[in-house]
Amino acid sequence: MKPALISGIQPTGKLHIGNYLGSLKNFVELQNSEKYRCYFFIADLHSLTEDFDPKEKPGQILTVALDYLSAGIDPKKSIVFVQSKIPAHSELAIILNNFSPTGELKRMTQFKDKSERQAENVNMGLFDYPVLMASDVFLYDAAVVPVGEDQVQHLELARTLARRFNNKFGKTFMEPKPFLTEAKRIMSLDNPEKKMSKSSPAGCLFLDDEPETIREKIKRAVTDSGHEVKCDPESKPAISNLIRIYAGFMNETTEIVEKKFKNKGYGDFKKDLAETIIRSLTPFQKKKKELIKKSAAVKKVLAAGNRKAGMVAGQKIEEVKEQLGLSID
Ligand code: AMP
Ligand code: TRP
């Protein structure tokens, strides 16, 4: 049997090109490689860890589904589902909590960052986020997890957790490996020291942005002193980020991009970059506009995915309970 691969995206707002180049584009390529049994889900339980409006949640969930399908995730090849529809995710997280030392969770960078950002709402869900994430992965025996760099620490914790659990109770979980792209960490357009993030929309280029907006945002994106199109993240973080974006969309190395713009300045490069992004996003945007009109069909895709994922996860959670002595009949 092919190895399983899983990843999820939180329904918290519009996706940006960091999400796309760091993960979504990779999901599609990995799916099409036909080397894996792919699961892609909407991490709606994870999204409750930040402030939200229940009225907006259904739309946000559907939007991630639309983003998946518009980017090229094919329900004939991959299982697409909604996390909260599969009770085993919550169940396994409650079980794994008992094998997750709080000291390890306290060290998580994302927990520390978000605790600072939402100081008035440092909740248990935020603290427990990596344990739920490990559950997401373990339930499907996933070996490979395509994510951006910010999620690597969570997967390391999942590996430790799997090892600890297996040593104690017998081989139960796979140790998942992160799968990163070259564009694993796209930085904000207005500050190359900060990662592009939905929490700071001013520095984001969204997948739904109109061509004019894309041109404007790229024109305004900060650059470094000098004029050479050269990738040097230490001394030229801003232009290096733009080069990485260009390379990501073109499937080229940064060296090739440098060569292409060898005797050209930032102005020419930015113009070409904007057009490249527009061209690359056009099929996605077109497909999404079509799919928005077919939300009933999209919901059907999710319902079918939920059924399939539920069977796999349901079996695994029973296996776990058995290992722990929780099944009497
Ligand atoms: P999220 O929207 O936080 O659920 O993130 C969805 C995916 O996008 C995850 O795999 C993240 O690691 C990835 N991601 C988020 N921001 C960036 C970024 N600035 N650069 C690269 N990948 C990112
Ligand atoms: N934590 C991921 C993010 O913020 C989303 C996610 C939840 C995930 N569960 C997962 C990704 C399991 C991969 C595997 O981007």
Image: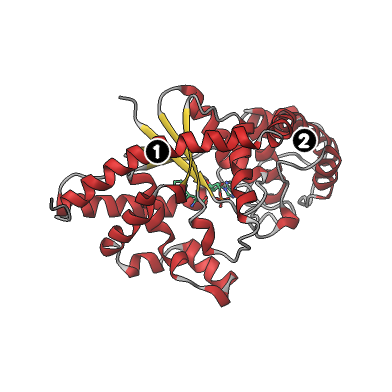
Label 2 and label 1: CA atoms lie apart by 39 Å
Q: Is residue 183 above or below residue 263?
A: below
Give the residue at mark 1: 309
- Is 161 left or right of 214, judged from the image as shown? left
Q: Three-letter amino acid code at disc 2?
A: Leu
Tag 1: Cα neighbours inside 10 Å, few (<14), some, or many (≥20)? many
Residue furthest to the bottom: 120
Q: Secondary structure at mark 1?
A: helix
Amino acid type, mark 1: Ala
Asked whether mark 2 and ligand 1 are closer than 8 Å, the reply comes as no
Asked if residue 140 shows in the view, the reply is no
Q: Give the image location of residue 234, x and y in percent.
A: 62, 51
Determine which quarter of the picture holds residue 1: top left
Q: Is residue 39 above or below residue 156?
A: above
Q: How is the image coloured?
A: secondary structure
Dot 2 corresponds to which residue?
273
Q: Is mark 1 within 8 Å of ligand 2?
A: no
Crowding at dot 2, Cα within 10 Å, few <14 / some 14-19 / many 20+, comes out as many
> Compared to 124, does 209 lie above or below?
above
Viewer-nearest residue: 312 or 257: 312
Q: Is residue 153 visible?
A: yes
Q: Secondary structure at mark 2?
A: helix
Tell me what residue is drawn at x 72 percent, y 33 percent: 281
Quarter of the view holding residue 141: top left
Q: Nearer the viewer, mark 2 or mark 1?
A: 1
Q: Position of residue 215 (x, y in %)?
A: 84, 41
Residue 16: where, in percent of width, then height? 67, 46
